[in-house]
Image: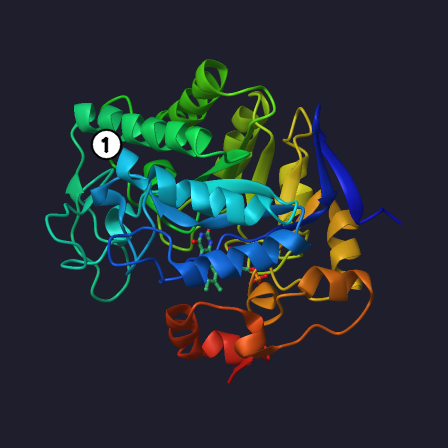
Amino acid sequence: MQDLIKYKLKENVTLKNRFVLAPMTTYSGNPDLTLSDEEEVYYSARGKEFGIVITAATAISLHAQAFTNQISAKSDFYLPSLKRLADAIKSGGAKAILQLHHGGRMNALGLYENQDIVSASSIKAERSNAATPRALETLEVYDTIEDFRQAMIRAIKSGFDGIELHGANTYLIQQFFSPHSNRRSDEFGGSLEKRLTFPLMLVDMALNTRNEFASEDFIIGYRLSPEELEEPGITLEDTTRLIEELSKREIDYIHLSLSSYKQSSSRNKEEKAPIINILQKHNINNLPIIGVGGIETKREALEALSLGFDLVAIGKAALSDAMVVSNILNDKPIKKVIDEDSLLPKDMKKRISEWSYLKDKGYTVK
Ligand SMILES: Cc1cc2nc3c(=O)[nH]c(=O)nc-3n(C[C@H](O)[C@H](O)[C@H](O)COP(=O)(O)O)c2cc1C
């Protein structure tokens, strides 16, 4: 049985346990998009529990902003806010990872003033009320990479232990990888290999930025969604290529965004093997892989490790139960009622109380 306590992520970086707070948008930043006091409380509590805390998706530019009151890293004005966030997480002994995000075509018209809704190509997402994005010009794609770089430098300056590139959940990085949203004919699109260009340029930019501005201990992670349901959409074959390329580079982990850690392919129902088993074969250099999706007990956490994940991320269970890791490690049932003791920002609590899928999973909001 693999140990859930202590994990050496890399030279000089040992985590207090294998649990990761999944990145979760709080909808609770201040109106100027700095960290609110309530968010600070939320992160301080989770920092005491988890080996790694990944922050909510943090916007790298004005055009990146996807959610109401989403915290920002778009200029140096945000350095003190980012420092408070890193300090809140680290004060409990967790490693603090800033999730760098651009919403692309998923952004809502009118949510932010003077915002351009942009993507790889001018193709709407397949959902109601989706805006038609403007395709970024080639030079603007390079500018966007520069925005990511500047945000990463701010993460380093504010004391974060690492960054995660948010290449999952249909946002901009994924939009460049997807044959649905990327129909470009320049160096950023056309074939699978060209659809890899933007994600891999970002990764290479992050590696160079670490060399230039941080120590080797600085953690670089990449989050991805292995499949899309759209036609055309990202297939597991596409993702195996991405994993092969990622694992050739000196990043520190790959984070699979899944609704269940043991999930099998949604596109190919004949294929029953868990996605982790399929992708792992292409992880040439055996990078650590984070799994997520429905983990609520010690048995499930251990099962995730035995399937091949190295670290387990927890989302919803960490919203209701501020002591979720202690409870899991002690084999105690987690608390599934979201109340004052959950230490959640009130706007986040309000927002998630409207989500039926939380209720479906047995969570209640008081
Ligand atoms: C309220 C909420 C906000 C989320 N925000 C983000 C986010 O900012 N970035 C991200 O990559 N995933 C986000 N997710 C997805 C989670 O990181 C996680 O993958 C998902 O909840 C499945 O894990 P779970 O079953 O343990 O909740 C969010 C999920 C929830 C419930």
Q: Quadrant of residue 121?
A: top left
- Count up the numbered dots: 1
Relative to 264, say whether 154 is above or below: above
- Label 1, residues with CA under 10 Å away: few <14, some 14-19, many ≥20: many
Residue 336 position within the rendered picture, expressed as x and y whole percent measured from the top left: 62, 77
Q: Amino acid at mark 1?
A: Arg
Residue 196 visible: no
Residue drawn at (80%, 47%) of the image: 5
Name the side, left or right, on which 281 lies relative to 337.
right
Q: Which residue is outermost to the top?
A: 212
Q: Residue at x 52, y 25 (%)?
A: 245
SS assignment at label 1? loop
Q: Is residue 164 left or right of residue 45?
A: left
Residue at 39% of width from left, 76% of height from top? 350
Residue name at image x 75 percent, y 66 percent: 327
Scheme of colours in the image: rainbow
Nearer to us in this view, 119 or 194: 119
Q: Which residue is mark 1?
A: 184
Residue at the left extreme, as displayed = 114
Q: Is mark 1 within 8 Å of ligand 1?
A: no
Q: Residue 296 appears at what percent x and percent y? A: 69, 66
> For this rendering, which residue is in front, 115 or 47?
47
Residue sitting farthest toward the bottom: 366
Q: Position of residue 1 (x, y in %)?
A: 89, 49
Q: Is residue 362 visible?
A: yes
In the image, 82 versus 268, the foreground residue is 82
Q: Furthest-right residue in view?
A: 1
Q: Position of residue 283 (x, y in %)?
A: 64, 30
Q: Nearer the viewer, residue 203 or 348?
A: 348
